[in-house]
Each structure stands twice: as structure tokens, then as C-alpha cells.
Image: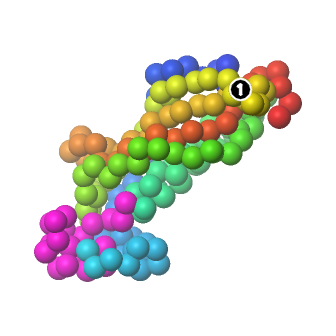
């Protein structure tokens, strides 16, 4: 991945898309969020969602999977070019998690990540702190998911 100095506010990357099938929604829900409107089409139709709805945690998990896969792809490409890779640190958390529109069976959500803020850590000056807005937009162009995530990113000339 990149070093702190390589990242700019406003930088955006499309990380991929995922189609939420009824089977995938039910499988995730059965294991992690067994609510009626995630498990049964009729219950979903009778709910405020109006159809079988993916768990918000499912949507967030898919976003995370695509972010990691895209980061691995970019790292492999950079390594193949002989570039030094920045090994990112942990995330101290996230804020502003919003499930804006229901994600229904058959919806395809496209995920993106945009840098909103960069700063050097006061307590760990060898690390930068990155805030990105991760979003998911459905096939109709409607924003369905949003979260503001934070990560530690190494400075180029540090040895974290």
C-alpha cells in the first residue's frame, strides 16, 4: 500500500461491486443477523424494507472485503514494479456508520473510498492518520451505505 506522503485529500478509488442475492442475504443473516426481514422474502415484503433486505452488517462486511482485496491487488502491482510498500497499521475505529437505503435481493452495490482528512499522529509521529469515507451506491445511483473509517499509515522515512 501507499505511504502517508503519497495520499492526498480528495483521492478516490473504486474498490469493486457485489450483487446481493437472496441466498447470500439469507446465509449471512442466518449466521450473523437472524432477523425475519433478512431471512424470509414474505417477511421482508411486509417490513418497512418492502423486500428481502441484506443486513447492514453484511453490506459493511462486503465493503471491507472489497477494500482489502483492492489493497492487496494494488500492493502486488507496486511490488511487481519494485516499489517499497507501506505496511499500514491498525484502524482505531470508525464513525458515522449509515445504512441509508435498504439493500434488497438483486441489488448490486458499487463501493468506493475517498480520503477526507490526513494528519500526523501527535503521539506516534512516525505514523499518519487517514480518514476515508467508504460508500456503497446501488445500481440506480442511490447512496445506500456510508462510513467514515480511520487508519494508521506509515510515513515513508519511518520504521514503524
- The reply, left or right, for residue 40 in relation to residue 129 is left
Tell me the quadrant of the picture where the N terminus can be found.
top right
- The reply, left or right, for residue 145 in relation to residue 13 is left
How does the figure colour the protein chain or chains? Answer: rainbow
**Displayed quadrant of residue 106:** bottom left
| Picture coordinates of residue 50, whole percent (x, y) | 15, 66
Name of the residue lying farthest toward the right = 159
Task: Give the number of callouts.
Answer: 1
- Report the magenta residues as a range: 38-56
Q: Residue at x 76, y 31 (%)?
A: 124
Q: Residue at x 58, y 24 (%)?
A: 118
The answer to whether residue 126 is above or below residue 139 is: above
Instruction: Indicate whether residue 51 is drawn in magenta.
Output: yes
Q: Residue at x 68, y 33 (%)?
A: 153
- The reply, left or right, for residue 27 in relation to residue 82 is left
| Picture coordinates of residue 113, whole percent (x, y) | 47, 36
Tell me the quadrant of the picture where the C terminus can be found.
top right
Q: Residue at x 19, y 79 (%)?
A: 43
Q: Nearer the viewer, residue 128 or 123?
A: 123
| Picture coordinates of residue 71, whole percent (x, y) | 61, 41
Q: Residues within 10 Å of mark 1 (few under 14, many from 20)?
A: few
Instruction: Indicate whether residue 126 is drawn in magenta.
Output: no
Q: Which residue is mark 1?
A: 122
- The reply, left or right, for residue 92 in relation to residue 43 is right
Q: Is residue 13 visible?
A: no
The answer to whether residue 127 is above or below residue 64 is: above
Q: For mark 1, give the secondary structure.
A: loop
Amino acid at each position: 500500500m501507499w505511504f502517508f506522503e503519497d495520499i492526498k485529500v480528495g483521492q478516490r478509488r473504486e474498490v469493486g461491486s457485489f450483487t446481493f442475492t437472496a441466498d447470500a442475504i439469507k446465509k449471512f443473516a442466518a449466521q450473523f443477523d437472524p432477523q425475519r426481514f433478512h431471512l424470509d422474502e414474505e417477511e421482508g415484503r411486509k417490513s418497512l424494507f418492502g423486500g428481502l433486505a441484506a443486513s447492514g452488517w453484511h453490506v459493511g462486511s462486503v465493503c471491507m472485503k472489497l477494500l482489502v482485496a483492492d489493497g492487496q491487488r494494488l500492493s502486488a502491482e507496486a511490488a511487481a514494479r519494485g516499489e517499497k510498500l507501506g505496511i499500514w497499521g491498525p484502524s482505531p475505529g470508525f464513525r458515522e456508520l449509515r445504512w441509508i437505503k435498504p439493500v434488497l435481493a438483486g441489488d448490486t452495490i458499487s463501493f468506493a473510498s475517498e480520503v477526507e482528512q490526513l494528519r500526523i499522529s501527535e503521539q506516534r509521529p512516525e505514523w499518519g492518520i487517514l480518514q476515508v469515507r467508504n460508500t456503497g451506491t446501488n445500481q440506480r445511483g442511490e447512496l445506500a451505505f456510508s462510513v467514515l473509517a480511520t487508519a494508521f499509515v506509515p510515513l515513508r522515512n519511518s520504521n514503524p
